[in-house]
Image (cartoon, rainbow, N blue to C red):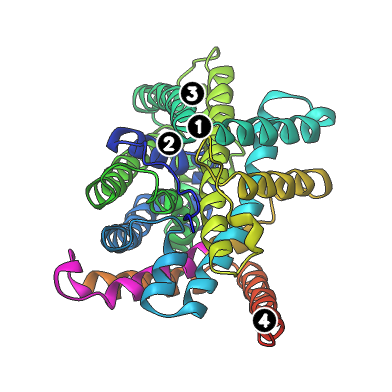
Amino acid sequence: MTSPPRLARRLGTTDAVLIGLGSMIGAGVFAVFAPAAAVAGRWLLLGIVLAAVVAFCNATSSAQLAVQYPTSGGTYAYGRARLGPWWGFLAGWGFVVGKTASCAAMALTFAAYVVPPAWQRPVAVLAVLVLAGVNLRGITRTARLTRVLVTAVLAVLVLVLVAGFTAGRPPVDTAAGAGAASVYGVLQSAGLLFFAFAGYARLATLGEEVRDPRRTVPRAIVLALGLTVALYLLLAAAALLSLGPARLAASTAPLTDVVRAAGWGWAPPVVAVGGAAAALGALLALVTGLGRTTLAMAREGDLPRPLAAVSERFRVPHRAEIAVAVVVAVLVCVVDLRGVIGFSSFGVLVYYLVANLAARSQTGTDRRYPRWLQVLGAAGCVLLAATLPWQSVVAGVGVFAVGVGYRLVLLRTARPR
């Protein structure tokens, strides 16, 4: 009996790092500083540092697990192998449901940058279908398009940095409006900002498609996260210097306001192009990661098994990719998720909680990092989840309750067989 086709190992370290950057430096960076500054004030940079510390702990856990389990599925596969099927399912369910909503949000965000409101839903659906088509042609096509999008976004962000650090300081009364923030406010800003770092999970889901995964995946995760943290700190500093905490907190387009503060009237359209490219890059990475996690869950029967098929020609999970694209396209047509995806942050934090617990259970030569990092990461995930807005927590708990009910039904119907 021949074994089913596997995904092809075609990505090197550079491609993996770029996919990680495309996942993290998404459209969120063009908007996340405003709500974070609203609760953290002038302590925004501290919120970024706290989010980065938790993200680093999670990244090292994912990297350590990827060395031992170089397969698709990320924390779903790791949690299942180290902690048991239920832990793996909780991680995979949170990732699939939360990130499917994020895909719809990114598609709508991209459309909002490029077309008038009446055309946004059709264009968002078209973007989803085009990117799904790119993914179906093979992982190297995905990497090439990611390279183009990341390059465009980084060029725009460098422009914003120059504008922010060369603009004049805001009036004292504007800067003073934000005042000092509470400890809770700083922690809540870290929870909001953490969502912008979460893209390194996509690298772990690609463990079956990189060359020399035991070396490539850990290196790519740490490199991509380090570059993103440095960039976010510089951008936040530039925004605070040029706008001040109060104006930054009230902004609906923070990076556009930064270039305006520098007197660069020609630059806002360029920033808008960068926002569109960032949303497209994030959407591409999200669809890619979702396809691989769906493949892993289908292989184990936690999602319909027909989704586990792999294309003989292009070596991609074509049925999973098509299913993801169809669901996202339907969501884009019927709801606007740009303002109601708080539960996605909750799901991501549960996902990494499982990753830290799984990495903590590793022993012997499989360990690369001290256990206290995994303990700190798990505690950080719980703390940041608890400080999210209560609506997000309630929605997140509801989503996981639905998932638990779904799996219980699956287990009950499978017993007679």
The residue carrying mark 1 is 255
The magenta stretch is 348-371
- Picture disc at residue 414: 4
Calculate the distance from the C-alpha at mark 2 to the C-alpha at mark 1: 7 Å
What is the three-letter code of the residue carrying label 3? Val
What is the three-letter code of the residue carrying label 4? Ala
Q: Specify which label sits upstream in the sequence, 2 or 3.
A: 2
The residue carrying mark 3 is 259
Look at the picture and state if 350 lies above or below 408: above
**Contact between labelled residues 1 and 4, with CB atoms less than 8 Å apart:** no
Q: Nearer the viewer, residue 61 or 134?
A: 134
Q: Is residue 181 left or right of residue 340?
A: left
Look at the picture and state if 24 lies above or below 89: above
**Contact between labelled residues 1 and 2, with CB atoms less than 8 Å apart:** yes
**Contact between labelled residues 4 and 3, with CB atoms less than 8 Å apart:** no
Q: Is residue 102 left or right of residue 244?
A: right
What is the three-letter code of the residue carrying label 2? Ala
What is the three-letter code of the residue carrying label 1? Leu
Look at the picture and state if 187 lies above or below 105: below
User: Residue pushed farthest front?
Assistant: 1
